[in-house]
Image: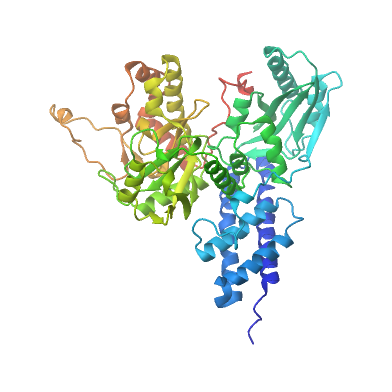
Amino acid sequence: MSAPVPDSHECARRIVAAFASYNAEFRAITRRAPQRFDERDWKGGQRDAVERIELYDRFVNRSIAELRLALGPAAEDRTLWRQIHAEFAAQITDLPDPEFTKTFFSSISRRLFGTVGVAPDIEFVATDLDPLARIHAAVDSNSYVNHGSLSLLFEDLLGELRFRSPWRDLDKSIAHVTSEVRSHLEAHGERRDVDKVEVIRPVFYQISRAYVVGRIVGREFQVPLVIALRNSDSGILVDAVMLKEEDVSIVFSFTRSYFHADLERVAEAVVFLRSIMPLKPVSELFTVLGRARQGKTERYRELMRHLEHTTDLFVHAAGERGLVMMCFTLPSFDVVFKVIRDRFAYPKTVLREEVLAKYQMVFIHDRAGRLVDAQEFRRLRFPRARFAPDLLAELRREAAGTVHEDGTDLVFDHMYIERRMTPLNLYLRNAAPAAAERVVLDYGQCIRDLAYTNIFPGDLLLKNFGVTRHGRVIFYDYDELCRVTDCNFRDIPPATDPDDEMRGEAWYYVGESDVFPETFINFLAFTDEQRAALLRLHAEILTAAFWRGVQQRLKEGEVMEVLSYHPHRVRVAGSL
């Protein structure tokens, strides 16, 4: 005898239970982070990061399969799903972060029905979801009152941190934090007393660092406070103190791997973080806290609401036209939309499936602060009238397999959305000499950082890199990206004939995975001054020996550190 078909109440209950199971497993993985930090198990932390990212799709797909099995043909009965939708809404009213649960429900219904645009009768519409609207309580935090001594305050703060590893020199770390705070306040002419320091209770973990995240509160002033902790061979120490909004924002950048912090109510933490980073979009804060799907929902909500209140047109993004991707933007909204072309012009030989795989690889990889977080969207609908004529014509001509017209709308079956940056080649064209040199040096550091995390960009042309508002260089063209450990880095063999070097093509055999680093500089459109600056600090990235050395360290299992702060911006303990 077959089992009875569940009713709408039971279906809703199962989805609520599935999300609860997902969330419990998400938090269980997150709670491994303190042990990884104590044991300096960075490889284990990397595995945890990938496992946690992949959880969401695993639970959504499992829920769909179970509902199809239980409901049979009724699994795609729209009337039933309207009832499930109503029952579900009633069952989640008292849950923490209910918008997360709504997003989970919408993921299930959209995949079941292949929804184009939005279907408000069977999903929760992103524009109606405001995860911060019902936040009336403060995030779980600790408050340390200043009783006349900042040193004693930070002694209390650091002393309450519970690690199994010993402090290397607690007094020195207390002095480091106290000195940095005093110096910062004096440098900014702040003579009023500090009343208290507030910190979010769970420690934030990211790769090989732990972070205490909080704020310094005085009479009518507030200063961000992020304390980076390192677990060295000889114990834990304060490695750096971030007190400027810009430095804190870089730590929480859209180019970083997600934090592992076990938060009871994530939205409350986002409200706190917005108080110290008011320019940071809410969508990026949810994402960097590990709630990538909620970050997508929030980004879509931000975009749709922006479209309702603006009239400017989607236009081609600045920079050279890509051979693989069509890139466009809305001038008044700080993102870029990327659509894969139907056909790739010569000399590109990559396949569409390979491009998709590269973007997925970046999604789960340690982005090291050098790879933009590209959010993948499906079946998005935009008014056709909002597209500039030349862009619309190119979409029809070059991306007809992905984009189609439905009434007065354009429907995108697939696209990526990422933060907009200034293409590096355009930045250098207009920058003052000092700013240009700083960015050229950071370009070299960007390539190093990517190498240390087992990423070879494949195409190092300046047009494939962008510059953020903080002046950081980021790589964003992934179609030729690959792992360092998959490449064969070679020196150019000596010419056997004087005429060899005069030819327009290589006189030596080049295999599919062969890379010749000493040729990189020939394709980089630097001025003589910029080239000299790069060679002064980063000449070794133009040698096969550098890449083979990094490759060997990676193959031996070493996790090379790429910090989210830099000694030229903050005082790092190693330099004290």
Quadrant where the C terminus lies?
A: top right
| Quadrant where the image shows the N terminus | bottom right
Q: How is the image coloured?
A: rainbow
- How far across and how far down the image is residue 79, in percent? 60, 71
**Can residue 350 be seen from the camera position used here?**
no
On screen, residue 307 above or below 243: below
Is residue 182 something one can see in this rendering?
yes
Q: Residue at x 61, y 68 (%)?
A: 81
- At horizontal 73% and vertical 40% (from top left) the residue drawn is 202
Which residue is farthest right? 147
The residue at the far bottom in this view is: 1
Percent position (x, y) of residue 122? 60, 63
Q: Nearer the viewer, residue 239 or 344?
A: 344
Nearer to the camera, 258 or 139: 139
Above-or-below relation of 520 to 220: below
Which residue occupies 25% across, 41% down? Answer: 510
- Snapshot quadrant of residue 535: top left
Asked if 444 appears above or below 362 in the picture, the reply is above
Which of 264 and 49 lies nearest the eye of the viewer?
Answer: 264
For this view, does 4 lie left or right of residue 218?
left
Rendering coords of residue 108 (x, y %): 58, 62
Between 309 and 181, the residue placed more toward the observer is 309
Question: How many discs mark residues in the rendered view?
Answer: 0
User: Residue 141: which quarter of the image?
Assistant: top right
